Amino acid sequence: MRPRCPPLVPGTVNAWTILAGAALGALLVMIAESISTRGSVRLYAYGLALAALAYVAFAIGGGATAWVPTEIGGGLFYLAAAVAGLRGYPLSLAVGWGAHVGWDLALHGGTETEFVPLWYVSLCVGFDLVVAGAILAKNWPPARLVGRSDQ
């Protein structure tokens, strides 16, 4: 049985841990925005890949071998979003981080995946939303759609 924080709704994610994740996400954004554009894109892309790989590690470490292919499949999706971001499509990073919230909640927000600590899911929700929002705010409207050349 995984350790639980007091939940927002019994058996689900915790509001305080979501806020802590949002604060950590804001810290990452502050760091990313203090370095070069290229460096920030790398930081967001590598972070997205690591966030996805954490679930693979949880599945392996928790002995949930039946979940490993699902987690690897998700990891490949987020890796593709990260690579697209590195190749000049920064909105793919926003989509990846935003989609990761869905992954967190849909697959790991309840009791079905005991191998993932619920605090981690809650932390990720806040973190992912802040990071996705910051990337979206910085890159909207897309340069390729409006002819912006400041990217």
Image (cartoon, rainbow, N blue to C red):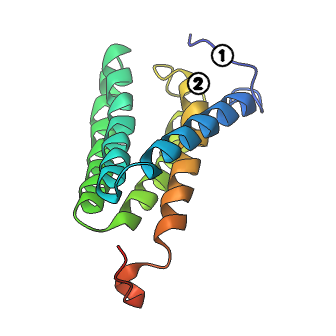
Check the image and report above or below for 48 versus 18: below
Check the image and report above or below for 138 versus 146: above
Tag 1: amino acid: Arg
Q: Earlier in the sequence, mark 1 or mark 2?
A: 1
17 horizontally vs 102: left or right? right
Question: Element type at marker 1?
Answer: loop
Q: Residues within 10 Å of mark 1 (few under 14, many from 20)?
A: some
Q: Is residue 109 visible?
A: no
- Residue pictured at 33% horizontal, 36% vertical: 50
Q: Residues within 10 Å of mark 2 (few under 14, many from 20)?
A: many
The residue singled out by tag 1 in the image is 4
Q: Disc count in the image?
A: 2
Residue 36 position within the rendered picture, expressed as x and y whole percent measured from the top left: 34, 54
Check the image and report above or below for 117 versus 79: above
The C terminus sits in image quarter: bottom left
Residue 73 position within the rendered picture, expressed as x and y whole percent measured from the top left: 28, 44
The residue singled out by tag 2 in the image is 118
Mark 1 in CB contact with mark 2 (< 8 angstroms): yes
